[in-house]
Image (cartoon, rainbow, N blue to C red):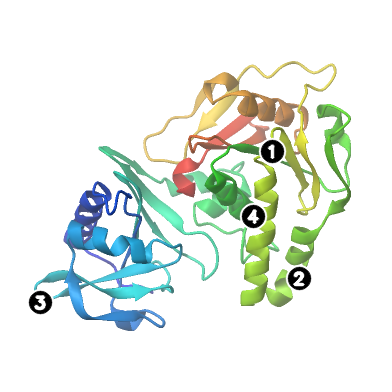
Amino acid sequence: MAPEPDAPAIEAIIDAAFWASLRREEGVTPRISLAYLPPESADLPLIFSEPLALHPASLAKLAPAVERPGIHLGVWGGPDGLRVWGTTRNLPPLCFVLEVVASGLLVIKHRNEPFGKFVNVAVLEGDQVKVIDERNALHPECPGVVQSLLGFELLTSDSAIINVLVMLAASMRAHGRGGALLVVPAGSSDWMDSIVGPILYGVHPPFSWLADLMRGEAADGDSHEWQEELRRAVDAIAGLTAVDGATLVSDQYELLAFGAKITRKRGNPPVERVVLTEPTVGSATVQVTPTHLGGTRHLSAAQFVQDQRDASGLVASQDGRFTIFRWSTHDDLVHAHRVEALLL
């Protein structure tokens, strides 16, 4: 377990990172990750001969060397305050991490597993602070992907090591073009009633690269080669969501089609209201029209889930918003989970 920072240390790290985010180094906004731990708690650390002061100018100067994913600047206390002692790629569980995402946009997070996405604790954007509310994971209808993003793993799940939908969501958001991913039951063709035919980019037989990797997870989950292959497979499918239309995969992660056009199932009513929630402290559950969430992708995904109630829809907007659609039997409506604060 990583050491727990006290309030003054947290304040000092946030303060230095915020002002560093407003600087420019050769015209580029710094993107850095700060981890609070001593060098002896890191695995294979790169240690500076002289620790650096935790100042915005120092962080901005270092940023070009450590902006690649997975590199963290180590911060620890000394006789004259907090210092940057070097870099590390490996962190102990629950290590305090602060990432500079963009100018004035910071995310506090930690990793609860040795492989997988970090769990966000709070998002600070300018003068707005969103604190993640983990209690949302305890709701009986909370989707597994949202539970995983909140740091909860289903003990009965066969995918205890990694939630592939989390990786797909993060990759979809990262490509920045927007996209829609629909997850349907394996072996069922009912979803075709909600798709305009013929499908321009249908896949037959289903593309099973990702599915094959997940079936081999129990044996190879700790393998570095398996992890890299999984990332490549995830990025390949997430990249297809940038094509106009929806990408469809089975709940066994087989690719069925991409670029598909969604239509309302014959005889079914149009979706008029959805339940909207965001897993942050102080946010309220409200009912809104689908157009309140975004454009055509959101409306069509909400319609698809209303018509195919055993399906899920993941929609990324070009502006970074991300919504997961599931049918709620409790509310008898489509439930839209806004989760961009968990994906930063």
Report the residue at 38% width, 52% height from top: 121
Which is more N-terminal, label 4 or label 3?
Answer: 3
- The local crowd at label 2, few if under 14, some if 14 to 19, many if 20 or more residues have their Cα within 10 Å, is few
For marks 3 and 2, give the CA distance: 50 Å
Q: Is residue 50 left or right of residue 125?
A: left
Report the residue at 47% width, 47% height from top: 342
Contact flag, marks 3 and 1 (Cβ < 8 Å):
no
Q: In the image shown, does 140 or 176 lie closer to the viewer?
A: 176
For marks 2 and 1, give the CA distance: 29 Å
Q: Which mark is residue 243?
A: 1
Looking at the picture, how far across and down is residue 296, in whole percent?
63, 24
Report the residue at 55% width, 34% height from top: 317
- The local crowd at label 1, few if under 14, some if 14 to 19, many if 20 or more residues have their Cα within 10 Å, is some
- Reading the image, the residue beneath label 2 is 216
Q: What's the amino acid at mark 2?
A: Gly
Q: Secondary structure at mark 4?
A: helix
Q: What's the amino acid at mark 4?
A: Asp
Q: What's the amino acid at mark 1?
A: Val
Looking at the picture, how far across and down is residue 264, in whole percent?
78, 21
- Reading the image, the residue beneath label 4 is 235
- The local crowd at label 3, few if under 14, some if 14 to 19, many if 20 or more residues have their Cα within 10 Å, is few
- Reading the image, the residue beneath label 3 is 79
Report the label total. Answer: 4
Q: Secondary structure at mark 1?
A: loop
